Image (spheres, helix red, strand yellow):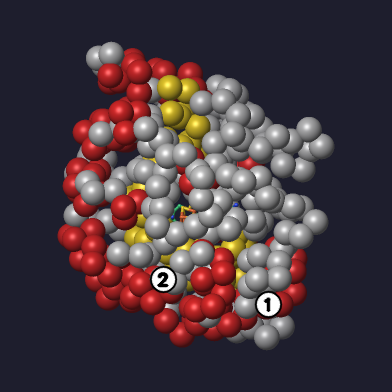
């Protein structure tokens, strides 16, 4: 039996956070300083990660693995972890969500290890805005990472962008033009209340409708066939008659929780049934106490029974999870 919840959803897509550390400090994700890192002994080792991923793939019907963080390229054992994951039977799809820094150096090794695709986060193509948003001057590294991913065939290369009011909210058209030019698939993500410093404000959030207003006419956007969306969170639009598309992930204004097929594993071995979950299920303790694969699988199945029907961001009683995005794995 797979990872079913009480509402008929079955999780088949596992997001694994490999570290909570990062070399950027995106304002919608992390504070400038003062965020405590997970303690080293709490972090799963490479072997422990592969063991849990293997339980998910072999016993629980998971067929998609995405490594994320924090910044997953900072994890020393990344290439090995990817390689061992792609050797699992049945072979899962394996992808990486990264800020792209250092990807130029590692892209070929990742491709050789069997990595299928990458999502690179890029919110602006202007160096000054990049510095303002990420608090670091690393735009050129990200652009080089994108090019390398494309060159080695980690395709389609997807780009994730978050728009922030007064910072880059007027830059959607140039970002889309840039992605069309380079054959990257762009998706905008609405800013969610997951930042460590709890600075999210609904009143200033840039909504999917606003982004569409900016793009619809100049790019001749038309909704793609809704039937092909499935559990994919992005609403997809063709650009100038197609075949190129742009996506918008409207987690806040148009939630898609009813179609959710995700589950998350944190770098310290906690199962989270939702980005916004306020509870977690510990697999690390059982793993380190010598639990067998079947027991771990059972614990994981039980963990899914608490999954709520929706994230509740729009309820007055919503409380942001204590764990920030950088430690959950976006
Ligand atoms: N460091 C990697 C990166 O930036 O791609 C992987 C981890 S990051 C947490 C994963 C994704 O979450 C990125 O695309 C990032 O833009 C997005 N993200 C982070 N904080 C967010 C927030 N508050 N709302 C919406 N998306 C967010
Ligand atoms: Fe780092 Fe990614 Fe968070 Fe930016 S969004 S601070 S790159 S973890």
The residue located at (63%, 66%) in the rendering is: 163
Query: Residue 285 at x, y = what percent?
Result: 35, 18
- Frontmost of labels 2 and 1 is 2
Residue 177 location (% of width, % of height): 54, 83
Mark 1 crowd level (few <14, some 14–19, many ≥20, 10 Å Cα): some
* In the image: residue 203, left or right of residue 114: right
Residue at x-position 28% and y-position 70%: 104
In the foreground, 54 or 2: 54
Q: Is residue 284 above or below residue 312?
A: above
Indicate yes or no: mark 2 CB to ligand 2 under 8 Å.
no
Residue beneath disc 2: 138
Mark 2 vs mark 1: which is more N-terminal?
2
Q: Which quarter of the figure is the N terminus placed in?
A: top left
In terms of depth relative to the viewer, which is nearer, 264 or 269?
269
Residue at numbered disc 1? 170
The structure residue drawn at horizontal position 24% and vertical position 37%, both measured from the top left corner, is 46
Q: Quadrant of residue 323?
A: top right
Does residue 1 appear left or right of residue 312 in this picture? Answer: left
Please tell me whether residue 285 is drawn above or below residue 40 in the rendered image: above
Q: SS for tag 2?
A: loop
Tell me if I can see residue 147 in this picture.
yes
């Amino acid at each position: 039996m797979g990872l079913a919840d009480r509402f008929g959803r079955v999780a088949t897509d596992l997001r694994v956070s490999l570290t909570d550390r990062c070399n950027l400090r995106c304002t919608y994700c992390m504070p400038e300083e003062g965020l405590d890192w997970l303690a080293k002994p709490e972090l799963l080792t490479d072997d422990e990660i592969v063991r849990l991923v293997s339980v998910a793939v072999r016993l629980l019907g998971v067929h998609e693995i995405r490594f994320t963080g924090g910044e997953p390229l900072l994890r020393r054992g990344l290439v090995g972890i990817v390689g061992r994951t792609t050797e699992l039977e049945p072979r899962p799809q394996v992808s990486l969500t990264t800020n792209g820094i250092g990807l130029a150096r590692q892209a070929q090794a990742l491709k050789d290890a069997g990595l299928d695709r990458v999502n690179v986060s890029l919110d602006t193509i202007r160096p000054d805005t990049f510095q303002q948003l990420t608090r670091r001057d690393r735009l050129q590294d990200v652009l080089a990472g994108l090019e390398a991913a494309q060159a080695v065939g980690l395709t389609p290369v997807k780009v994730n962008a978050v728009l922030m009011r007064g910072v880059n909210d007027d830059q959607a058209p140039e970002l889309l033009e840039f992605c069309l030019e380079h054959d990257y698939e762009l998706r905008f993500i609405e800013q969610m209340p997951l930042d460590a410093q709890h600075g999210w404000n609904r009143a200033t959030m840039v909504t999917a409708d606003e982004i569409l207003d900016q793009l619809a006419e100049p790019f001749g956007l038309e909704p793609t066939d809704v039937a092909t969306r499935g559990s994919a969170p992005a609403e997809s639009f063709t650009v100038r008659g197609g075949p190129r598309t742009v996506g918008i992930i409207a987690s806040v204004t148009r939630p898609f929780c009813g179609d959710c097929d995700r589950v998350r594993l944190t770098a310290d071995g906690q199962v989270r049934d939702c980005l916004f979950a306020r509870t977690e299920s510990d697999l690390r303790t059982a793993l380190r106490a010598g639990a067998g694969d079947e027991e771990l699988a059972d614990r994981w199945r039980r963990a899914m029974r608490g999954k709520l029907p929706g994230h509740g961001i729009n309820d007055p009683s919503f409380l942001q999870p204590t764990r920030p995005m950088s430690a959950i794995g976006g």
